[in-house]
Amino acid sequence: MRALLILFLLFASHLSVGATDLKPCELVVPCAVGDRSFHARLPDNWDGKTPLPVLLHFHGWGRQGPLIMKHSRIAGATRKLGVLLLAPNGLGRTWNFWNADTSDVSFALSVIEEAARRWPIDRSKIFVSGYSYGSAMAWRFACSQGQSINTLLAVSGSIPDQTEDCSSPVNIRHVHGTRDNVMDYPFGPSGKVESAIRLWRARNGCDVQPDSQERWQAVKILSFHRHRWETCASGKSIVLDVHKRGHFIPRYWIERQLKELL
């Protein structure tokens, strides 16, 4: 009997070590995924047990995850809305979104799974976002892994080929400036702004014309023309916010989207 007790205690001890052997990582301390890494920021006032919505954000060209951890327009939103922020680090400070078979998609999936090992996450509320080249990478990820995410939040960037065959319909929220000269606004042949999300209109089974339009603004110096497609055959919706300025993350845009989605 004593021998069995000793074996049980050794086994329990092994399980305990296995459950707590993850090296701590948060904020500027990166979390390892194979030979790559990502950064994470927990929301303020989290109780330590409630499953967390997730915002997986791809940084812009030349950047890395630590910038996202302190970005007021990204982390400033997730911190107060109870969302776990994940910021993968791109190889060479950029992303390979040009081809459907890019390894950056599988890397981003690994980031989500590693985060799930460390913190309880709500898989029904995984949001994917990005800015500039990161926005194009977020499009690529949504096109490949649409079934695993709730909504794509894209800022000033899209994949070049909008005729690709994406895996599944996806809820889309995209914002872009008509004077963007870095990731040019993708006007259609007739100059219509709706062409910016033509791939998702086709994949989601939406009409060409939006179901409704409205204007809104979060700050006085910037207004948006919002186009909504809410009666798509797939049951997914599309929101396109267009403004008349250039290449940047609009103040409070990510925060508003998360508030509405949550």
Image (cartoon, rainbow, N blue to C red):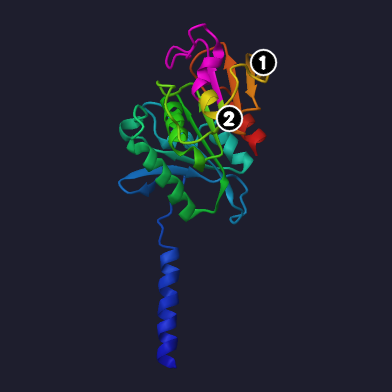
Can the viewer see residue 103? yes
For label 1, count other residues whose C-alpha is less than 10 Å away and answer few (under 14), some (14-19) or many (20+): few
In terms of sequence position, does the residue under pointer 2 or pointer 1 come before the other?
1
Q: Is residue 81 left or right of residue 106?
A: right
Can the viewer see residue 29? no
**Is 105 in front, or is 52?**
105
For badge 1, the amino acid type reads: Lys
Question: Pointer 1: what residue?
Answer: 220
**Is 178 in front, or is 73?**
178
Callout 1: helix, strand or loop?
loop
Q: What range is drawn magenta here?
A: 174-199
Q: Is residue 26 above or below residue 197?
A: below
Quadrant of image for the C terminus: top right
Callout 2: helix, strand or loop?
helix
In which image quadrant can residue 257 be found? Answer: top right
Residue at the image point whose x is 43% and y is 74% from the top = 13
For label 2, count other residues whose C-alpha is less than 10 Å away and answer few (under 14), some (14-19) or many (20+): many
For badge 2, the amino acid type reads: Ile
Question: Pointer 2: what residue?
Answer: 254
Q: Is residue 32 left or right of residue 50?
A: left
Residue at the image point whose x is 52% and y is 24% from the top = 202
